[in-house]
Amino acid sequence: MSERGRSLSMFVVQRTFTRVRRGYDPEEVDRHLELVSRWFTSTDAGKAIAEERARLKERESEAEHLVEGARIEAEATLEGARRRAEADTREAERRLAEAAAALDAARIEATAAAAIREAQEEAQEIVATARAEAERELETARRAGEQLLAAVRAEAAEAAERLRAEAEEELRAYVERRRREADRIARRERG
C-alpha cells in the first residue's frame, strides 16, 4: 500500500465526529462517508477493490450459474432416482406378490404332500392289517381244509372199505350162486 493510502486509511480510522444530543451529526457523518467513498474509488486501492468487487460479482454470477446448473442436475438426478425408486418399489412389490403366491403354493403342496404321506402310511397300515388278517384267515382255512380233507379221506376210506366189503360180499354171493347153478346144471346133466 502506498504512503497516501496509509495516510488516508489513518484518516478513516482516526476520524472523530461532533457529539450531538442523540449521537453524531448525520450531515457530518454523510459528508465523511462521501469523502471516504471518493477516496476509495479514486485511489489504486479503491480501483483494486472495485476490480475485485467486479471479479467477485462475476465469480458470484458464475457460481450462481454453476449452482443453478447443479440444482437443475440435482433435481433431474433426484427425479431420476425417485422414478427408479418407484420402479424398484413396483418391481419389489411384484416380486413380493410372486413370492407370496409361491409360498402359498408351497404351503398347499406341503399340506398335500403331508396328507398324501399320511394317506400312504394309513394305506400301508390297512394293507398290513388286511394281509395279517388274510394270513390268519388263510391259516384257519388251511387248517379247516386239512381237517376237512382228513375227515373226507377218513370218510372215503370208510366208504371204500364198506364198498369193498359189500363188493366182496356180493362177489361171494355171486360166486356162491354160480357154483350152485353150476352144481345144478352139472346134476341135471348127470341125471
Image (cartoon, rainbow, N blue to C red):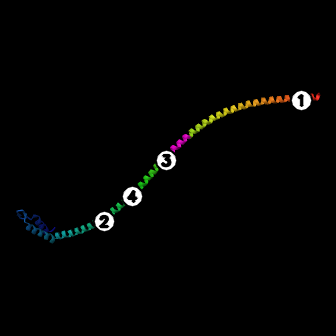
Kind of element beneath mark 4: helix
Instruction: Work out which quarter of the rendered image holds the N terminus and state it.
Output: bottom left
The part of the chain drawn in magenta is 111-126
Is 111 situated above or below 71? above
Q: Which residue is mark 2?
A: 72
State which mark lies toward you, 2 or 4. 4
Q: Nearer the viewer, residue 145 or 169?
A: 169
Q: Which residue is mark 3?
A: 112
Q: Looking at the magenta stretch, what is its main secondary structure?
A: helix
Please state which amino acid type lies under the numbered disc 4.
Arg
State which mark lies toward you, 2 or 3. 3
Give left or right: position of 133 versus 61: right
Q: Earlier in the sequence, mark 1 or mark 4?
A: 4
Please state which amino acid type lies under the numbered disc 1.
Ala
Q: Nearer the viewer, residue 56 or 19?
A: 19
Q: Which residue is mark 1?
A: 182
Q: Earlier in the sequence, mark 1 or mark 2?
A: 2
- Asked whether 123 falls inside the magenta stretch, the response is yes
Cα–Cα span, label 1 and label 4: 127 Å
Kind of element beneath mark 3: helix
**Res 62 quadrant in image:** bottom left
Q: Nearer the viewer, residue 6 or 54?
A: 54
Residue in the image at 88% along x and 29% along y: 181
Q: Earlier in the sequence, mark 2 or mark 4?
A: 2
Please state which amino acid type lies under the numbered disc 3.
Ala
Q: Position of residue 67 (x, y in %)?
A: 28, 65
**Res 160 quadrant in image:** top right
Label 4 crowd (10 A; few <14 / some 14-19 / many >=20)? few
State which mark lies toward you, 1 or 2. 1
Q: Which residue is mark 4?
A: 90
